[in-house]
Amino acid sequence: MTMAFFRKQPRQLRELLDDFIDDYPHRVALKRGMVLALWPEVIGEAIREQVRDMKFQGSRLILFVPDPSWRHEIHMQRRSIASKLNTAVKEEIIRDIIIKS
């Protein structure tokens, strides 16, 4: 009896990685780490320089910004920032951004 080998069509590495992440048991934690890693390139230098620290609290991203005028500016852009970061990781990881001093 002969064994037939069936090969699927080759897949792109990006597609394989996306499938792996979707099935990964700690997907949300991984995606949060991706958000933090992508922060500098997605957000831009001006805002990046003003944020002193950040952390996740559930689906909220907490940003620590000492300057009051920058806190206000980032607060006004928080939905846009969340959208850009969620788009970068292809999932709604951030539902809200809280700015603290």
Image: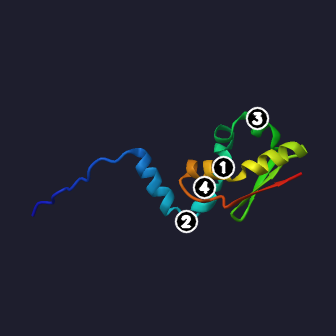
- Alpha carbons under labels 1 and 4: distance apart: 18 Å
Q: Can you give x and y, in whole percent of width and height, for residue 94 in the image? A: 66, 58
- Alpha carbons under labels 2 and 3: distance apart: 35 Å
Instruction: Identify residue type, mark 4.
Output: Lys
Q: Nearer the viewer, mark 2 or mark 1?
A: 1
Q: Can you give x and y, in whole percent of width and height, for residue 66 in the image? A: 90, 45
- For mark 2, give the secondary structure: loop
- Res 3 → quadrant: bottom left
Crowd rating for badge 2 (residues with CA inside 10 Å; few <14, some 14–19, many 20+): few
Crowd rating for badge 4 (residues with CA inside 10 Å; few <14, some 14–19, many 20+): many
Identify the residue under disc 3: 46
Instruction: Identify residue type, mark 2.
Output: Pro
Residue 31 marker: 4
Which of the two residues, 11 or 91, is positioned nearer the viewer here?
Answer: 91
Q: Nearer the viewer, mark 2 or mark 4?
A: 4
Identify the residue under disc 2: 25
Crowd rating for badge 3 (residues with CA inside 10 Å; few <14, some 14–19, many 20+): few
Question: Which badge, 3 or 4, is on the more N-terminal residue?
Answer: 4
- Alpha carbons under labels 2 and 4: distance apart: 12 Å
Report the residue at 61% width, 47% height from top: 84
Instruction: Identify residue type, mark 1.
Output: Ser
Identify the residue under disc 1: 80
- Res 51 → quadrant: top right
Question: Which badge, 2 or 4, is on the more N-terminal residue?
Answer: 2
- For mark 3, give the secondary structure: helix
| Image quadrant in which the N terminus is located | bottom left
Report the residue at 73% width, 34% height from top: 45
Question: Which badge, 1 or 3, is on the more N-terminal residue?
Answer: 3
